[in-house]
Image: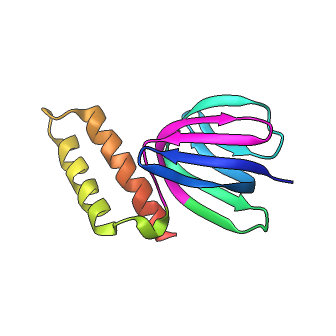
Amino acid sequence: MAFNLQIIAVDRVFFEGEVGKIILKGTEGELAVLPHHTPLTTTLAEGEIKIFLEDKTKKSASLMGGFVKIGKDKTVILTEAAEWPGEIDVDRALAAKERAEKMLKDSNANQARAMAALRRALVRLDLTEK
């Protein structure tokens, strides 16, 4: 049994296909979606999405927040950015992490923006280490 998953990032349709299950990070915690899930719309946090295909193959990607609309037969995710592990530039993510950490030490910096940048960098780095 499967359902259709569509992940739309700002710059592209990131993924579209039939899946058996997904696990992703909502702002209220982790969420698993299976076929015939109760309809739900909620916000997403920065984090990893685990996509389980019908043949039990697992794919992982990063999602940079957004929204998910879960229907009985189709789930649509709208996100600022989505990346497969091979698309992530580790050096760039490390540099972003260092910049964010410096901003957090600066009392004149926008702390919320620095924390968001740090979360995005950590999600990317965590995904490349798996």
* Span shown in magenta: 61-83
Tell whether 63 sits left or right of 120. Answer: right
Q: How far across and how far down the image is residue 2, in percent?
A: 81, 53
Q: Quadrant of residue 104?
A: top left
Nearest to the observer: residue 97 or residue 19: 19
Tell whether 77 sits left or right of 94. Answer: right
At horizontal 27% and vertical 63% (from top left) the residue drawn is 92
Q: How far across and how far down the image is residue 68, in percent?
A: 60, 36
At horizontal 34% and vertical 40% (from top left) the residue drawn is 116
At horizontal 60% and vertical 38% (from top left) the residue drawn is 29
Q: How far across and how far down the image is residue 23, in percent?
A: 66, 50
Tell whether 69 sits left or right of 33. Answer: left
At horizontal 73% and vertical 41% (from top left) the residue drawn is 74
Nearest to the observer: residue 125 or residue 81: 81
Residue farthest right in this picture: 1
Q: Quadrant of residue 33?
A: top right
**Mark count:** 0
Q: How is the image coloured?
A: rainbow
Tell whether 50 sits left or right of 27. Answer: right
Q: Quadrant of the N terminus?
A: bottom right
Q: Quadrant of residue 128?
A: bottom left
| Most frequent secondary structure within the magenta stretch | strand
21 up-or-down from 79: above or below: below
